[in-house]
Image (cartoon, helix red, strand yellow):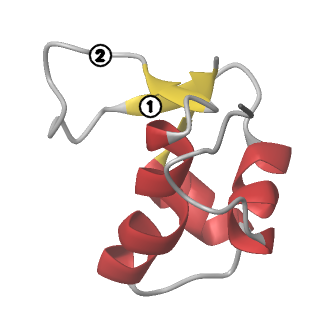
Amino acid sequence: MSYKPPYKITPAIVSLISIINSGISTKESMIVLSLKNAKNFCQHHLLPAITNNLIKMMQLDKPNSPTQKYQLV
């Protein structure tokens, strides 16, 4: 039986992973990827990448913090 990730790894997720290095915020990520809609970014980029254990939050105790950053797992 093979492992099936919860979300399909899409080009959107790959583009997010390609820009994350030591830590990047949602706003910084959206600027680099030229995205303007935060809800769309979270739904199609951020959440699938977190769910597939590709990236993680740096401040686990404050998931909604405006200073929240993400890093590769």
Q: Residue at 80%, 71% (x, y): give it.
A: 11
Residue corresponding to mark 2: 59
Badge 1 marks a residue whose secondary structure is strand
Depicted 31 relative to depicted 68: above or below = below
Front-most of residues 24 and 41: 41
Residue 22 higher or lower than 50, as above or below? above
Residue type at tag 2: Gln
How many circles with numbers are drawn on the protein?
2
- Residue 44 x %, y %: 49, 72
Judged left or right of residue 19, residue 13 is left
Secondary structure under tag 2 reads loop
Residue toward you, 20 or 55: 55
Residue at left offset 73%, top offset 69%: 10
Q: Is residue 69 left or right of residue 5?
A: left
Q: Are marks 1 and 2 in contact (CB under 8 Å)?
A: yes
Identified by mark 1, the residue type is Lys
Circle 2 residues within 10 Å: few <14, some 14–19, many ≥20: few
